[in-house]
Image (spheres, rainbow, N blue to C red):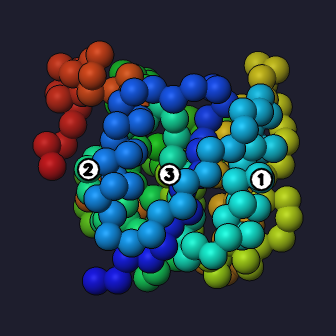
Amino acid sequence: MRYPSIAVTTGNSQPWAYSDYMWSMMHNVMTYPGRVQLYRMEHHGIDAIRNNRGVRAFLEGDAEVMVRMDLDQWYPEDFLITMAPLALEYKVIGPEIYDRWEHNEYKILCFNSKFDPWNNWIDCSDATGIKSYPYTHTNNFYAREVVEAVPLPWFEAKMNKDGTDRGAHPDYDLLDRIKHAGYEVYLNHNVEVHHLFVGRSHNKLYNINKRGK
């Protein structure tokens, strides 16, 4: 097993990090057999600007793989060890992300379209192994060759219907460009990432919904 060097950039707009994120992220960094470069992008209220700065920092460095880790999520202890080597093979691959309670269950973030995604949600709750999907969300691992193959801007500033600037928070823009360059987007159903409001404050509901892997 080869463990590529990783550039870890941050996602989300809040200027702080939750303790669960910090502990789980640092455990992954400290136990990863390869080299890890941490980039804490300066806080910026517009997601596209922060995300583009993260991609630029990765390309200006020499890491082989990039991953954007969200500040409000908890990561399993083998997150980097499991996912980073897969990026060498699959080029673009993310984990299952269990989001907040949505439409009467905890849903895995996986969509057919980036437009109105919850009305284009894919029910992949029974899937196993590694599968290809049109759109994952964040926490994707990108091989350097993939990012180098797509043009600027990697993320475009846009507004949501409610007037906020969260339209560029997920990786949808970058995934569009990557697919246009001929790459597929994969999701590893063997690795679970939890939004921090999942599995902690609503443990019972999560356990009922969880597949028990």
As drawn, 103 above or below 126: above
Report crowding for label 3: few under 14, some 14 to 19, many 20 or more residues within 10 A (C-alpha): many
Q: CA distance from mark 2 to mark 3?
A: 15 Å
Give me the disc on residue 33: none
Q: Residue at x 38, y 22 (%)?
A: 197
Query: Relative to residue 211, is residue 78 drawn left or right?
Result: right
Q: Nearer the viewer, mark 2 or mark 3?
A: 2
- Name the spot of residue 18 as percent of width and height, x first: 45, 26
Taking the spot 74% from the left edge, 79% from the top edge, the residue there is: 149
Q: Which residue is mark 1?
A: 52
Question: Residue 207 at what x, y percent from top left?
Answer: 17, 29
- What residue type is disc 3 on? Asn
Element assignment for label 2: loop
Residue identifier under label 2: 77
Residue 177 in view, yes or no: yes
Instruction: Name the disc covering residue 139, or none.
Output: 3
Amino acid type of disc 1? Asn
